Image: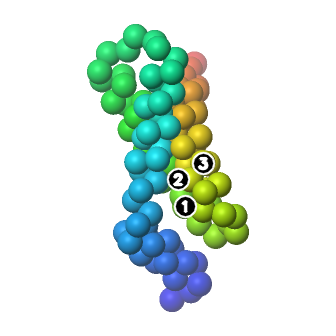
Amino acid sequence: MNNDDQSLRAVIADFKAGGWVVIILGAMGAFVKLVITNEKYQAFVWGRKIFAGACVGVLTYCALYYVDILPIYKGILYSISGAVSSELFDIVRSRLIKGETK
């Protein structure tokens, strides 16, 4: 077993122990952004954008796992990443659609 595999196991173990909270932080960041912008979306679009925030929150957790900063700043980064996740997913989606039509 190499060190990369052990590192991944450590990240997964810590995520199970309490890192799952980043799902809530990312989703709440996306939710708050939707409430603040006051745009009219269908419930499905709200769910999709909040789910995107949760996914990006988890990706941010994995990216920042070994970064040595205070936990409060990590929590802020999780929420911010969740708030901008819908735009990120929309950009990727539009580029994929453009690539399919060419």
**Between discs 2 and 3, the one toward the N terminus:** 2
The residue at which mark 3 appears reads as: 76
Query: Could you tell me which secondary element the residue under label 3 belongs to?
Result: helix
Residue located farthest toward the left when viewing the structure as drawn = 43
Mark number displayed over residue 59: 2
User: Gap between marks 1 and 2, in whole Å?
Assistant: 5 Å
> Could one spot residue 89 in this view of the protein?
no
Q: Is there a contact, CB below 8 Å, between mark 1 and mark 2?
A: yes
Picture colour scheme: rainbow
Image point 59% across, 84% down: which residue?
A: 3
As measured in the structure, the alpha-carbon distance from the residue carrying label 1 to the one carrying label 3 is: 15 Å
- Mark 2–mark 3 contact, CB under 8 Å? no
Quadrant of residue 18 in the image?
Answer: bottom left
Residue depicted at 55% across the width and 49% down the height: 78
Q: Position of residue 61 (x, y in %)?
A: 54, 58
Q: What residue sits 46% from the left and 12% below the top?
A: 39
For label 3, count other residues whose C-alpha is less than 10 Å away and answer few (under 14), some (14-19) or many (20+): some
